[in-house]
Amino acid sequence: MKTFQYFANNDWHEPASGEYFDSENPANGEVWAQVPDCNAEDVARAVAAARAAFYEGPWGSMQPAERGASSGRKTLRRRSNPMPGRSTAFTITRECATSSRAG
């Protein structure tokens, strides 16, 4: 089973509490991963990093389309269902499972 970290300030982190919870695949109900049980300290870290990136970096002066183009990442928003014949929930679950970094 995979165990994931959370991403903030351009780095991967363990949750401050050290606790994780089960993530179930909505397609079959099976537990497929352990994900961070983030608390207020983790949220404060992520918010501080986002504010710094927006107000001190180039993000704040860019238009949303520019931010999306500069990220170099494909998003579900910019493409049709990448798995025709599958439900949206399955597609999002697979997208999350394959685009996250296992810790």
Image (cartoon, rainbow, N blue to C red):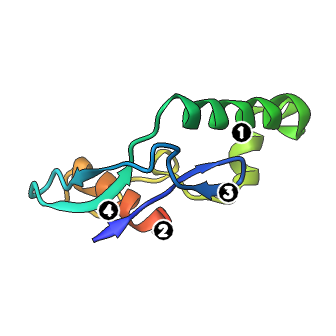
Gap in Å between the C-alphas at discs 2 and 3?
Answer: 12 Å
Residue for point 19% across, 56% down: 25
Q: Is residue 1 above or below residue 12?
A: below
Residue 91 appears at what percent x and percent y?
29, 56
Pick whichever of labels 1 and 3 is earlier in the sequence. 3
Residue for point 56% across, 58% down: 74
Q: Amino acid at mark 3?
A: Asp
At numbered mark 1, what does the secondary structure look like: helix, strand or loop? helix
Q: Which mark is residue 15?
A: none
Pick whichever of labels 4 and 1 is earlier in the sequence. 1
Q: Amino acid at mark 2?
A: Gly
Q: Quickly name the residue at label 3.
A: 11
Q: Which mark is residue 103?
A: 2
Residue 34 appears at what percent x and percent y?
31, 58
Gap in Å between the C-alphas at discs 2 and 1?
Answer: 31 Å
Left or right placement of residue 53 versus residue 82 in this view:
right
Residue 27 appears at what percent x and percent y?
13, 55
At numbered mark 4, what does the secondary structure look like: helix, strand or loop? helix
Q: Amino acid at mark 4?
A: Arg
